[in-house]
Amino acid sequence: MSDHAHESHTGPIKTPAQLLWTSFFSFVAPIFIIIGLVYYVTSGDKPAAGAVDPELATAIRIQRVGSVELRDANRPLQAGDAVYKAQCAACHDSGLAGAPKFGDAAAWAPRVTTGYEALLTSALKGKGAMGAQAGGAFSDIEIGRAVVHMANAGGGKFAEPAAPAAADAAAPATEAAAPAATAAVEVAAAAPTATPAPAAPASATVAAGAGEALYKQACAVCHVAGVAGAPKLADKAAWAPRLALGVDGLTASVIKGKGAMPPKGGSAASDADIQSAVTYMLAAVK
């Protein structure tokens, strides 16, 4: 009777070996499992903090400091909604890359409080994933009108920038300079005629500059960081399957739009400028 009662009060562990294995599976094994999971999660190839792609860094270092761009000074200034549709809607309609959506008062409220000048400066110089909008197809005043159009749709009450009156002020100066210009022409006519030097191919320079300027203005916002699957600039692996299309094929894709990229990258650029921007990006991977 006493032996049976004694056995009923004993646990399942009856030997030192059983105690050792029970301790192992209860404490040691879970630790090794956790270590294995942590190693699995952190073992992926990730760039070190602050690391920069050497090819991208080289492309940035050797890029031109400036570019040549021709604009029609006599064309009428575009309204804010037109500039928005051509230049800004690609990101601000959908909130791409953190851009505040058009008409989202909650997203625009903290930005509106900074004032028009601060918003214009951010647009012209670029901020976050948004590239600098200055120096592109639109003037600073037109970019300012687009800023006002977006800010006012989000609760702002800014006045649209007016066209400058510089043209009227410059007219008297032009008339005063006319006699001097006439005299200069007469002196030049009296001088011996020299054989003119061959003209430099300015059109090629302008085309190359237009391509780079368009890339920085409309393409860099996605292609620098690879937003929405866009191939990064100078990333040979990402561009390799696209090289087979050639300049013409890639230009056609940009003009029509593909995937998350809207037609012409959301810009109002001409087909020739689009081709120049494609050529500029392809040159970075050759």
Image: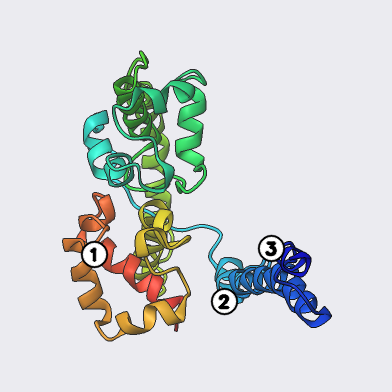
Asked if one can make out residue 128 in the rendered structure from this viewpoint, the answer is: yes
**Residue at left offset 69%, top offset 63%:** 49
Labels 2 and 1: the sequence-earlier one: 2
- Cα separation between marks 2 and 3: 17 Å
Location of the C terminus (image quadrant): bottom left
Where does residue 73 sit, x and y in percent of width and height? 30, 40
Q: Is residue 189 above or below residue 127?
A: below
- Which of pointers 2 and 3 lies earlier in the amino acid sequence? 3
Residue 244 image-quadrant placement: bottom left
Question: Which residue is found at the position 40% from the left and 71% from the top?
Answer: 281
| Image spot of residue 237 (x, y percent) | 44, 82
Tell which circle, 3 or 1, labels the residue nearer the N-terminal end. 3
- At label 1, the amino acid type is Val
Disc number at residue 55?
2
Specify the label residue 254 is tagged with.
1
Callout 3: helix, strand or loop?
loop
Of labels 3 and 1, the one closer to you: 3
Distance from disc 2 to disc 1, alpha carbons, whole Å, reads 24 Å
Pointer 1 local density, CA inside 10 Å: few below 14, some 14–19, many at least 20? many
| Residue bearing mark 3 | 49
Dot 3, crowdedness within 10 Å: few (<14), some or many (≥20)?
few
